């Protein structure tokens, strides 16, 4: 019996199901088999890939047989050709040049800034008030990415910048979900709105580049990008190339972490025993001080909380790949131009690998438990050469934000809150945001 099965139902019915509720569709399709054919066109067949073995081949062992394809084309309308959208050797070159900004020593240097920025934000919160925490997390991570990576303080302009990022994210998500590609040059309302938002982002980024060129003392990512020379020509990177990397880090670097933090606050609010263990750990490790980089390594239960939150609600909820050539995997042949749909959201809820998969149980990540799982049963940051370049930074950032907030407050879901539902855009958001009540814990 083959390892590829066909989905039942009509093609149109399945497409409408996916359009209406992609997470439900992918989760149900996971139950059908290791690889599920969507019975799409013969020239460009589509598959939902559920098996860790096949996912490993696509993302790692046979990754050269695949490209990002359509997803890169659509994201590239906003991001250009940065490390997230570049293909092949161009991507490899870009990743090599950017890795120094994410080495452990560099990441350690960002910890103090993250702690101070978070403390400054929560210091303004008032006990007993309600806040839109999802918006707070977006604002905070945007300001921190601008400071840590690009050495720039932003204040009131964060709202305008954040709105422009939101417009670009929504625009890209709609294009990815649509079977029809409308060229961005056409003067549709959506294209016009996106063009205006992108114009503001471009103005902001090119101003950053111009300012950085006048400062020889800086040591952030922007300085690194300005110092890079092309491996073939020896020339410095053009401003457009630097712009593409900045915008990639700016949008991807704050959106995903903000959403992960929002989901984590929600999950803690619904699980008082986990929340109590979290607070006990913070009190024992931090006392009355702000977390340092060294403290992060001692926040073991906090890390388990983050890992479990990423299991249930991975920001990168789906990964798309297209075959460059005919490729064999698991004894099955897949034609060139095949589209592979991989969903960390669905894979992380597989009962074959996770007991009580729908439940929030941070302890499942205690000790060496991850080593008992197949490599691609849990992959919130992707895998292979295209895994998230900032994963270590993101984990540290999330741990510090949780620690700084958690040592001062409990966050309680607001009364009469709308039902909590995931919204699968480019990243997995909470639909209509997350309102929470601020409860002071009695610590200074």
Image (cartoon, rainbow, N blue to C red):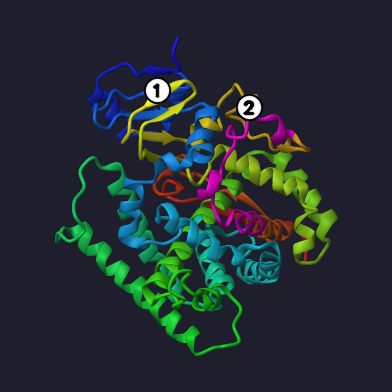
Residue 189, image x, y percentages: 18, 59
Q: Nearer the viewer, mark 1 or mark 2?
A: 1
- The residue drawn where x is 60% and y is 42% is 309
Q: Which residue is mark 2?
A: 354
Residue 287, image x and y in percent? 83, 61
Q: Is residue 414 visible?
A: no
Indicate the secondary structure of the residue bearing disc 2.
Answer: loop
Side of 24 where 367 appears, left or right? right
Image-quadrant location for residue 96: bottom right
Q: Which mark is residue 245?
A: none
In the image, which residues are magenta?
369-397
Residue hosting label 1: 36
Question: Foreground residue, 163 or 67?
Answer: 67
The percent position of residue 86, horizontal first and vertical second, equals: 40, 56
Query: Which corner quadrant holds the N terminus?
Result: top left
Q: What residue appears at the point 35 percent right and 77 percent down from the top-left corner?
A: 203
Tell me if residue 194 comes above or below residue 377 in the rendering.
below
In the displayed structure image, the side of residue 232 where residue 41 appears, left or right: left
Q: What is the count of numbered marks?
A: 2
């Amino acid at each position: 019996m083959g390892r590829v099965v066909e989905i039942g139902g009509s093609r149109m019915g399945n497409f409408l199901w996916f359009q209406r509720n992609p997470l439900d569709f992918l989760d149900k399709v996971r139950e059908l088999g290791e690889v599920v054919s969507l019975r799409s066109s013969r020239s460009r067949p589509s598959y939902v890939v559920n098996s860790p073995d096949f996912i490993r081949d696509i993302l790692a062992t046979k990754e050269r047989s695949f490209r990002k394809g359509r997803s890169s084309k659509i994201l590239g309308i906003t991001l250009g050709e940065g490390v997230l959208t570049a293909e092949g050797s161009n991507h490899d070159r870009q990743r090599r040049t950017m890795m120094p900004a994410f080495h452990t020593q560099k990441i350690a240097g960002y910890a103090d800034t993250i702690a101070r920025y978070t403390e400054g934000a929560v210091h303004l919160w008032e006990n007993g008030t309600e806040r839109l925490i999802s918006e707070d997390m977006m604002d905070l991570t945007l300001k921190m990415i601008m400071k840590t990576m690009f050495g720039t303080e932003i204040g009131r302009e964060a709202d305008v910048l954040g709105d422009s990022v939101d417009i670009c994210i929504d625009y890209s998500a709609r294009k990815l979900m649509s079977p029809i590609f409308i060229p961005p040059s056409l003067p549709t309302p959506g294209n016009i709105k996106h063009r205006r938002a992108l114009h503001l982002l471009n103005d902001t980024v090119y101003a950053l580049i111009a300012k950085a060129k006048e400062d020889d003392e800086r040591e952030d990512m922007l300085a690194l990008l300005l110092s890079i020379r092309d491996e073939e020509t020896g020339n410095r990177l053009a401003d457009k190339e630097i712009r593409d990397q900045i915008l990639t880090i700016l949008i991807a670097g704050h959106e995903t972490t903000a959403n992960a933090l929002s989901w984590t606050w929600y999950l803690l609010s619904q699980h008082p025993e986990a929340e109590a263990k979290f607070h006990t750990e913070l009190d024992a490790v931090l006392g009355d001080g702000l977390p340092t980089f060294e403290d992060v390594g001692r926040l073991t239960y906090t890390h388990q909380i983050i890992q479990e939150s990423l299991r249930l609600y991975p920001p990168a909820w789906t990964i798309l790949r297209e075959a460059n050539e005919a490729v064999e995997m698991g004894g099955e042949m897949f034609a060139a131009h095949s589209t592979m749909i991989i969903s960390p959201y669905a894979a992380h809820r597989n009962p074959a690998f996770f007991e009580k998969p729908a439940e929030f149980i941070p302890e499942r990540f205690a000790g060496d438990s991850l080593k008992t799982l197949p490599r691609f049963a849990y992959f919130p940051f992707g895998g292979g050469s295209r895994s998230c370049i900032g994963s270590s930074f993101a984990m540290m950032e999330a741990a510090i934000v949780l620690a700084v907030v958690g040592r001062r407050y409990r966050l309680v879901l607001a009364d009469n809150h709308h039902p909590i539902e995931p919204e699968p855009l480019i990243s997995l958001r909470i639909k209509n945001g997350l309102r929470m009540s601020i409860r002071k814990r009695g610590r200074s």
